[in-house]
Amino acid sequence: MRIGVLTSGGDCPGLNAVIRSVVHRAVVDHGDDVIGFHDGWRGLLEADCRKLDLDAVSGVLATGGTLLGSSRVRPGQLVDGVQRALDNVATLGLDAVIPIGGEGTLKAARLLSDAGLPLVGVPKTIDNDIAGTDLTFGFDTAVGVATDALDRLKTTAESHQRVLVVEVMGRHTGWIALHAGLAAGAHVVVVPERPFDIDRLTERVARRFAAGERFAIVVAAEGAKPAAGSMPFETGDTDAYGHERFAGVARQLSAELERRLGKEARPVILGHVQRGGTPTAYDRVLATRFGWHAVEAVHAGAYGTMTALRGTGIHLVPLADATQELKTVPAERYAEADCVL
Ligand SMILES: Nc1ncnc2c1ncn2[C@@H]1O[C@H](COP(=O)(O)OP(=O)(O)OP(=O)(O)O)[C@@H](O)[C@H]1O
Ligand SMILES: O=P(O)(O)OC[C@H]1O[C@](O)(CO)[C@@H](O)[C@@H]1O
Ligand SMILES: [Mg+2]
């Protein structure tokens, strides 16, 4: 067979491990050709690609980023380009495509699949917000980076008796904030799923100082917002790709806490450091397993699906199910964390 592969949306640690696994399973075990498209959907729309052999994926297992490049393409451009994508796949003689991406990429994959493109998706994102899979690769690495940062921030916060408000990624969901907050023993975690009550949050931090503690760490997912009307809060506009531009929850929350508590507060934005660098062993293993199963799904003709972790097994789920809604942090997961925060 001839199989195309691409990485689309924000990068995350483990993308190269998937590409490597696809090439090994397809080329070595099945005798297939693998064609890598450059910069995600852009490469497919412009037939910008190269053949991937074993040399191309040698030494990439532990590397961050994506050897194929990634990009965002305006959804309208992709919708208009469906026929071009189908034509390019036919001209290149491809039997199937394996797009590796987040929920946007998988929505685009569903669109192309419905239009007749044979494909099997692989879910990626540090945000861990894709429905249908227990976990996405990249999440474990991002949580590790954020936890390490929080551990470090505790010591400087304590030295200066400060409140540090640490903003982690998580545009729609608070998985990174919750897990890193739990792992590092943060004192408050705010997530997009639950608008926060600024009075309760302030009281909680004030109680800590009143009890003789010398610092506080608040973890905020970038998409977290206060309950409507409870404090002044700027929101951003929308970018060319339809994503909200954030106005900075850490900046605004730390200013409000400083004003209310009379304690020094500082915002810390971890940003893209959470997406860079070498994947953890867990993410390398999950990514490698996803790649293997994606190739098997292509050979089985199981198109219009996505690889997914369920328990410890890898399964295929219909793209239609995986793209219906995001996997948000359920109230009970937040409740479990609440007593130790
Ligand atoms: N609703 C949609 N319809 C068609 N194409 C879409 C849609 N949503 C996203 N896409 C395409 O998929 C690309 C990747 O989507 P997006 O930018 O949301 O990243 P992602 O795959 O969700 O990864 P992440 O959000 O984790 O960075 C977009 O740039 C766009 O080309
Ligand atoms: O790299 P960009 O385009 O700024 O995107 C950032 C977004 O991508 C993600 O890292 C992954 O979805 C989000 O957590 C974040 O909001
Ligand atoms: Mg997205």
Image (cartoon, grey):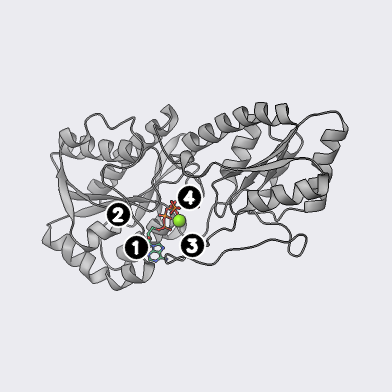
Residue type indicated by callout 2: Gly
Task: Compute the Cα span from label 4 to label 1.
Answer: 24 Å
Q: Where the C terminus falls, by quadrant?
A: top right
Q: Which residue is at 28% across, 32% downward?
A: 60
Q: Residue 132: which numbered mark, if any? A: 4
What x and y, as percent, mark residue 121?
A: 34, 51
Task: Compute the Cα span from label 3 to label 1.
Answer: 12 Å
What x and y, as percent, mark residue 51?
A: 14, 45
- In this rendering, would 117 be left or right of 144? left
Q: Which residue is mark 1?
A: 73
Residue type indicated by callout 1: Val
Q: Which residue is mark 3?
A: 243
Task: Compute the Cα span from label 4 to label 2.
Answer: 22 Å
Q: Nearer the viewer, residue 234 or 74?
A: 234
Which circle's residue, 3 or 1, is located before the other in the chain? 1
Q: Which residue is mark 2?
A: 40
Circle 2 residues within 10 Å: few <14, some 14–19, many ≥20: many
Task: Compute the Cα span from label 1 to label 2.
Answer: 8 Å
Circle 1 residues within 10 Å: few <14, some 14–19, many ≥20: some
Q: Tell whether circle 3 marks a residue whose Cβ is less than 8 angstroms from ligand 1.
A: yes
Which circle's residue, 2 or 3, is located before the other in the chain? 2
Judged from the image, the secondary structure of the residue bearing numbered disc 4 is loop
Q: Which residue is at 40% across, 34% downward?
A: 277
- In this rendering, would 75 be left or right of 269? left
Residue 64 position (above or below residue 260): above
Residue 76 position (above or below residue 193): below
Q: Which residue is at 18% across, 56% downward?
A: 48
